[in-house]
Amino acid sequence: MRMLSIPLLVALAGCVSPMQHAASSSDEAAGFNVQLGLGYLQQGNLVVAKEKLERAERESPRDPKVHNAMGLLYERLGDSKRADDEYRTALRYAPKDPEVANNYAVFLCKSGRTEDGIKYFLEAGRNPLYRTPEASYTNIAVCLRAAHREDEAKQNLQHALAIKPNFAEAAYQLADLEFERGRLNDARAAVTHYTDSFDATPDLLLLGVRIARAMGDRVAADRYARSLRMDFPGSEQTRALSDLNHNPGS
């Protein structure tokens, strides 16, 4: 199961707060190096990412965005202790920043610290300044699924969809949860409810294929597969259809 990543990138590249409007040249340089560092991190160039982020830390050592980025870096480097220290430092400098809380929560859940992760996700999700609370509740559900707490996960996914009915990731997670539990009717209902009202995503269409095949509904499976090929011809999910064709039981 995947943890959402988009909110993390938004957090690190977020807007400047009112308290930062008179940023010094060193703060501006640090922000530039944070963006460079994150870009190299996404490309997998960890050596240069580390160089840029360490430079940003020297330029603005009390900037929470710098320490947030450093936390991501040390996660990628497999240094959980340093990553934890960096996220805590970011929280110390920005204790009420919901984006920082969300980032730390993702790290905690990936580390198996479920209750701590949920605590910080809730801090983010309940903060009126947080722009994507539905992502926090979806991440809570992912965290709970990893801990085999499916009923609680379902409740949080339903809450996420109540906040934003067109949040595709929550719909996908809900359908996937029911599919894994063998509740095929509920899984199909979750996919259908979303795709009847909003534009389908590749993930939901591929899952729709898998659910329909498990239910022996070849017509529905073919319909989802056709939509996937037509609307997302170059997607990873479309390429995965061939694997399903070779392994129909998967």
Image: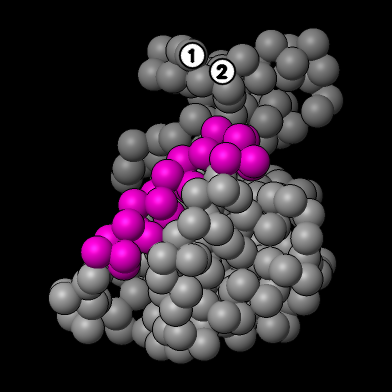
Task: Tell me residue 244's x, y (percent).
Answer: 73, 19
Task: Give the residue at mark 2.
Answer: 238
Task: Name the residue at 58% across, 29% down.
Answer: 206
Q: In this view, does 24 lie to the left or right of 105?
A: left
**Tag 1: residue type?**
Gly
Along the line of sight, the residue nearer the viewer: 242 or 58: 58
Task: Tell me residue 39's x, y (percent).
Answer: 46, 41
Q: Is mark 2 on a helix, strand or loop?
A: helix
Give the class, few, some or many, for how many residues have Cα within 10 Å of label 1's Cα (few <14, many ≥20).
few
Residue 56 appears in the figure: yes
Task: Tell me residue 22's x, y (percent).
Answer: 16, 76
Q: Does the magenta stretch include residue 39?
A: yes
Question: How far apart are labels 1 and 2 at the CA level?
Answer: 7 Å
Task: Give the residue at mark 1.
Answer: 234
Res 248 quadrant in image: top right
Along the line of sight, the residue nearer the viewer: 200 or 88: 88
- Report the mark closest to the observer, 1 or 2: 1
Q: Do the residues labelled 1 and 2 touch (CB within 8 Å)?
A: yes
Q: Is mark 1 on a helix, strand or loop?
A: loop
Look at the picture and state if 249 lies above or below 108: above
Magenta extent: 25-48
Res 62 quadrant in image: bottom left
Give the class, few, some or many, for how many residues have Cα within 10 Å of label 2's Cα (few <14, many ≥20).
many
Task: Tell me residue 209's x, y (percent).
Answer: 61, 27
Q: Is the magenta stretch mostly helix, strand or loop?
A: helix
